[in-house]
Amino acid sequence: MSDFTNDHMMLVILAAAAATYLTRIAGYLLLTVVSDIPPRAEAALNAIPPAVLTTLVAPAFYAGGIEAKIAIAAALAAGLRFSSPLPMIGVGWSVVMILRYFVIPS
Amino acid sequence: MTKNAEMINGAQAGLVPALSAAPFGALFGAVAISHGQSVFEAVMMSITIFAGASQLVGIELFGQRVAPWLIVLSVVAVNFRHVLYSAALTPVLAHFSLPRKMIAFFFMTDPQFAESLKRHEAGTPVTFAWYMGAAITIYGLWNVMTLIGALLGGFIQDPRALGLDVLLPIYFLSLVMGFRSRPNYLSIVAVSALASVLAYATVGSPWHVSCGALAGIALAAILPPKKATDTVSEVSSS
């Protein structure tokens, strides 16, 4: 894939913005057309966000250095306890910084 | 209540969520710059898309040189919950004129949805003035914080030295964990994780996104359907 020029970047942003707006009115529009969704289709639709987001976490864990792996694992543990993003980010970030500067200096 | 009082009331309802989203606005701005976007592009993303998680996904994929259509598709995937929200808000906003509905839906975010539904269920009418008071507070602060983050991000020489490289995966992990009450959650996440790592190690980036996601979605369709948990409770508890 070649590098994006600025024009392309702007076009992708605007396309993503238009698509996002469509998701925001889609429920309103659909409500006037469809009344019920088959259960398996609904299960597939429900699975889309966690499935997509997982693909942005797992390879980063796999490809990251040992300090990134430990930080992500620590954030996971924090998430089980606090279930909100900020403590997870705080714990993960602190762990990676401590490891990088004090434990495994490169 | 007068229109002004309604608007101020709405602004107050929007203030706490606006402040709690503020660090993510700054994070988005800074990460966008460190992934090669200009300040203008970063701010344009916040102004036009106005959906934090999907904006960060977009930035991550821009950095990986993923095909444009796949970026748009991934942004839609993360924003898919909006479809459910707008369906749930339709009766709440039924008294708005059509142009006002179309404006209101542009500003619909997780907290906007949750606050509106809460007000409606408490028996207080959700007026356009109240709705926009909350919306403009959240929207305004989000864009200001993006600008601040983007301007500060320009000073960052080495994102790794500041630990910025682990922030995105951890943020996405927190979003993944936010869905844990959904049916078959663990099996879907496990299959997506495995498939995405396999694709990453064999076919290579960017295919790990679509391969991993499709594996999880396919599994969800194959497994015996269960009753989904209420989306509303999932939102208000987050």
Image (cartoon, helix red, strand yellow):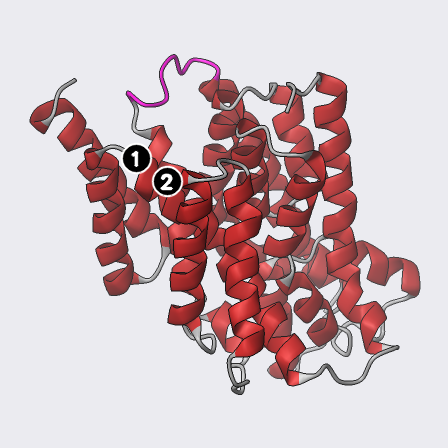
Residue A101 % position (x, y): 14, 23
**Pick the front one: A75 or B73:** B73
Q: Which residue is mark 2?
A: A60
In the figure, B22 relative to B192: above or below?
Answer: above
**Pick the front one: B125 or B154:** B154
Where's the C terminus of chain B, which quadrant?
Answer: bottom left
Q: Which residue is mark 1?
A: A64
Chain ID at mark 1: A
Q: State yes or no: discs 2 and 1 in contact (Cβ < 8 Å).
A: yes
Q: Residue at x 74, y 59 (%)?
A: A24
Task: Read off the magenta span.
Answer: B154-161
Q: Mark 2: which secondary structure?
A: helix
| Most frequent secondary structure within the magenta stretch | loop
User: Residue at the right extreme?
Assistant: B98
Q: On the image, which quarter does residue A40 sit in?
A: bottom right
> What amino acid is at disc 2?
Ala
Residue B130: tell me if it is visible. yes
Picture mark count = 2
Tell whether A103 sits left or right of B137: left
Q: Mark 1: which secondary structure?
A: loop
Tell whether B65 sits left or right of A53: right
